[in-house]
Image: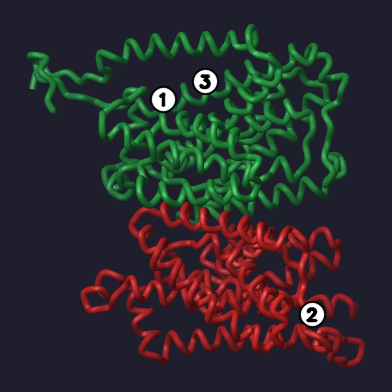
Amino acid sequence: MTGYTVRRYGQHHIWIGVLALLSVLVLAALPAFAGKAALRIATEMAGYMALAVMWNLLAGYAGVMSIGQQAFVGVGAYALFVLCGTMGLPLIPAIIAAGLLTTLLSIPVGLILFRLNGAYFAIGTWVVAEIFLLLTAQSQTLGAGAGLSFPAGVAKSFGTATERAALFWWIALSIVLLSVGVAYLWLRSSRGLALTAMRDDAEAAAGLGVDTKRNRLAVYLLAAGVAGMVGAVLFLGKLRISPAAAYDINEWTASIIFIVVIGGLGRLEGAILGTLIFFVLRGFLADFGAWYLMAMGAIAIVVMLRMPQGIWGFLHERTGIELFPMRRDICPPKGRAMS
Amino acid sequence: MTELLNSIIQGILIGGLYALFAAGLSLVFGIMRIVNLAHGDLIVAGSFLMYSAASVLGLPIWVAALLVLPVMALLGYGLQRSLINHTIGTNVLPPLLVTFGISIILQNGLLQLFTADNRKLDFGAIEVMSLKAGPISVGWYAILVFAVSVATIWGLQVLSFHTRLGRVLRATTDDPEVARVMGVRTEHVFGIAMAIALVICGIAGVLLSAWTSFTPLSGPSRLLIAFEVVVIGGLGSIWGTLIGGVVLGVAQALGGYFDPAWQTLAGHISFIAILALRPQGIMGGRRQ
């Protein structure tokens, strides 16, 4: 058995890495050549992408079907308005604090809800989000049903409108890079191998000694933290928050599910591709209101029934293409890869 | 004090309706191991069918109500055979996502057809008549709703345990594979089960259409109630849904008695409390 090696990259991955680095640089330099409106859309896209990457990790890998992530988006957003807007904490620490708060909050929530199996867990997460919504709407300090405006004075301290748009974009970009980076490194680690095994067959993975419960909870905590930070930065951009918008299941969960299912469940690239497709569709069709949402629902059903692996999964099956190398190829001593 | 007692009685009576919301969900989950996320929207679709038949076509209430039920049964059988059957397997995601898609299509389709206006049907004198016993007064319509709900659940119980169809349904619940080997056409049985579930949704939708106002977007909150009732009552127990419904109804009534804004919240909190303290539900004996 000596001489066998495990190869974890293909030749072309060096080039993909270079290309990824270049695109990150271009994205970081976006404020130099994009206007306020474009930056706002880019910020929103980054937020959705981070949520989608996390939802994919939850549903696609860990088998945790949450339809209540809006709970953490909302709490994170309100936390920022209070910590930064009212109490005067600096912006970046406030966003990090929002993420930590939602992570902490997800521990008791997760421990109670994980008593429910698959589908019932899903609705349980939704009930929790509804409880958060109703409690928020009761609180006079949080502006009750009408919500809060971000104090203009604090907003102005971040710079002019253009400078603010750039700042929020960089924060959102950092969050999405962090999410993709953590997800990628996690999936490549031995813990990630356990997650991938759970994706393929949770029962078999458990039989081979994978602590599925612990892994599920770990992913749930991470996703809650990211959702909190995304909520914080997206509502910061809007400068206004209300319970109905902050805990909106359509915005923060239904759209995200659509993105992940279309892009490819259980593929890291799927969430990224799905976000791009979603924003293109939304850009063209959003004016059609209810018809647009019906079309989204129909597309999701058709993809789930006819192409359950999503568009990226379909491409991967046909061509073997992978942007984020996850495979472990065993190479015999003379360097001839086994197929 | 009298007011409190009145609230509790009102809570018990609406609990019957909540049990109806839950019975279909529970039936489908028991047989197919799937949660139908469009369940609430299908109840609301029942209300809109009733509205169309009674208000738009101008049919008498009884005729309209009896017309809604076969339409719902057909809808259920059709949805099951054309879409949901293709998602049933070991993975929990496909049925959830497909029924979620159906839910979005139903909500927005109803929105296109009926706009977002509040609707409520008028069933006439029965809505304002009440039974008075000393200081306590209970609306006859609430009593009727409770009676119909209990009768429906009793009917479901009889169907499950005293008919040939019930035997097939229970056999499929216990083990679909073995049932198939014994000659049960499971795809057809699943279709029948969904048809029965939607008839129950239809009954609930008809009763609800005069109880309170509804819009095309009322579905999700009905689904949440149905789901909470199933968990509170205990998975897989038919009478458990009635107990769960009453518990939730009374919790909401008590919450609403102290502060109207706390009505829904008190229901959700009672659900979380039961889940934390007795995860198998009130009537659920076996622990998994």
Q: CA distance from mark 3 to mark 1?
A: 10 Å
The residue at which mark 1 appears reads as: A184
Q: Residue furthest front?
A: B57
The residue at which mark 3 appears reads as: A177
Kindly indicate whether the residue at mark 1 contacts the one at mark 2 (C-beta within 8 angstroms). Answer: no
Q: Position of residue A40 (x, y in %)?
A: 67, 23
Relative to residue A208, is residue B214 depicted above or below? below
Circle number at residue B122? 2
| Residue under the point 57% across and 71% down | B22
Chain for numbered disc 2? B
Relative to residue B261, is residue B68 depicted above or below? below
What amino acid is at disc 3?
Leu
Specify whether A67 is left or right of B12. left
| Residue under the point 80% across and 12% down | A160
Residue nearest the viewer, comparing B65 with B281: B65
Camera-side mark, 2 or 1: 2
The way the protein has been coloured in the rendering is by chain
The tint chain B carries is: red
Residue nearest the viewer, comparing B121 with A144: B121
Chain for numbered disc 1? A
Q: Visible in this render: residue A121?
A: no
Residue nearest the viewer, comparing A253 with B85: B85
Which image quadrant for residue A247? top right
